[in-house]
Image (cartoon, rainbow, N blue to C red):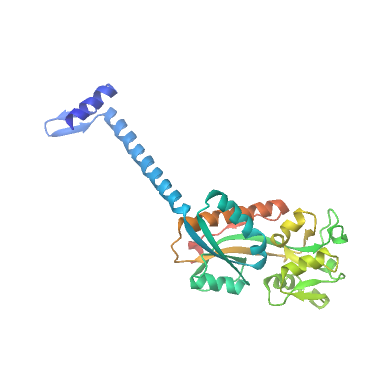
Amino acid sequence: MHQQIRNLEEQVGAPLFDRMPRGMRLTAAGEIIIAAVRRGQRDFDNALTQVEDLRAVRRGHVNLAVSASSAEHLVPSAICEAMARYPGVTYSVRSGNGESILRAIETGEADIGYALRRRPPPGVVEVRAFAQKLGVVTAPGHPLASPGRKPRLRDCLDYPQILMSPDTELRAMVEQIDHRQQQRVRPLVETSSVSMVRRLAGEGVGIGFLIAENVAEDVARGALAWTPLADAGAKSFSCLYQRADMSTTGAINMFLQILIEAIEAMEDRLGAPRGRRSSKRARE
């Protein structure tokens, strides 16, 4: 050990220790060298942690519970992105309504849930919330989709309406906007299928009311027009959910981040409001 210290002092060109009758004390040069060694050790430990995290993501399985609309568009694009980076991870995806999605998280059948906001059961927390605007869905060229137009719900009710079923969160968003207009909400078609609303609106049968995520791909290819409603109440949140006590894996954390990126990219394409961060612990 003494010889190693002497060799290091020769390399540095200065004594690292003051030799004293009862031991040794670091010199100023020694303090600098020791600090550098400790920083190097921390950097090395951090590098080992990152390598271990990378190894953990190479394999694993992620269980998802999402709406049918998200399973059709959002989740496939996120899985494609994840597979390009980490091809060893596998996925199970179930679709349902908000209640069934939260139940799957509560029972441990799903690692990540994504749905329009509703009160979670005990033990389930919001990981991230994204602001959502309700918009009117029409065929391209419809008067309500005129450039610069900012329609309100009352402007839409003279047109045939293709509405989601009364037991859905999307229908609740329509009904919360203006209770004075509810007598005029007389749907031509009611359905629990977002795909049917999109299809009938695109065919010009009527208009629908959906959030940006539901129609992002249709709008991008020019099959539909989506115009946000100007009513103050035409908004809600979509949320990512997990169990409060779950031990996440590298694969789950990886996909959660990719899913957040996919949601934000979709918002940017349609000019929808950006999401807001929501702390798990803040909601426990």
Q: Residue at x 80, y 75 (%)?
A: 189
Residue 187 visible in this rendered orientation of the protein: no
**213 left or right of 251?**
right
Q: Is residue 87 visible?
A: yes
147 vs 74, left or right, is right
Quadrant in which the N terminus is drawn = top left
Expressed as whole percent of the image width and height from the top left, the position of residue 281 reads 48, 62
Depth order, front residue of 23/38: 38
* Residue found farthest to the front: 88
Q: Position of residue 52 (x, y in %)?
A: 41, 49
Q: Residue at x 80, y 71 (%)?
A: 162
The image position of residue 49, as x and y in percent, is: 40, 47
Picture layout, residue 278 above or below residue 174? above
Q: Say which quarter of the image contains residue 36.
A: top left
Identified at 57% across, 49% down, the residue is 84
Number of marks: 0
In the image, is residue 109 above or below residue 7?
below
Please indicate whether residue 194 sits to the left or right of residue 102 in the image.
right
Front-most of residues 4 and 86: 86
Please state which of residues 178 and 43 is positioned toward the viewer in this rendering.
43
Q: Taking 162 as reference, is 33 above or below it?
A: above
Image quadrant assignment for residue 35 = top left
Residue in view at x 71 percent, y 51 percent: 269
Residue 167, given in percent of the width and then of the height, sits at 68, 77
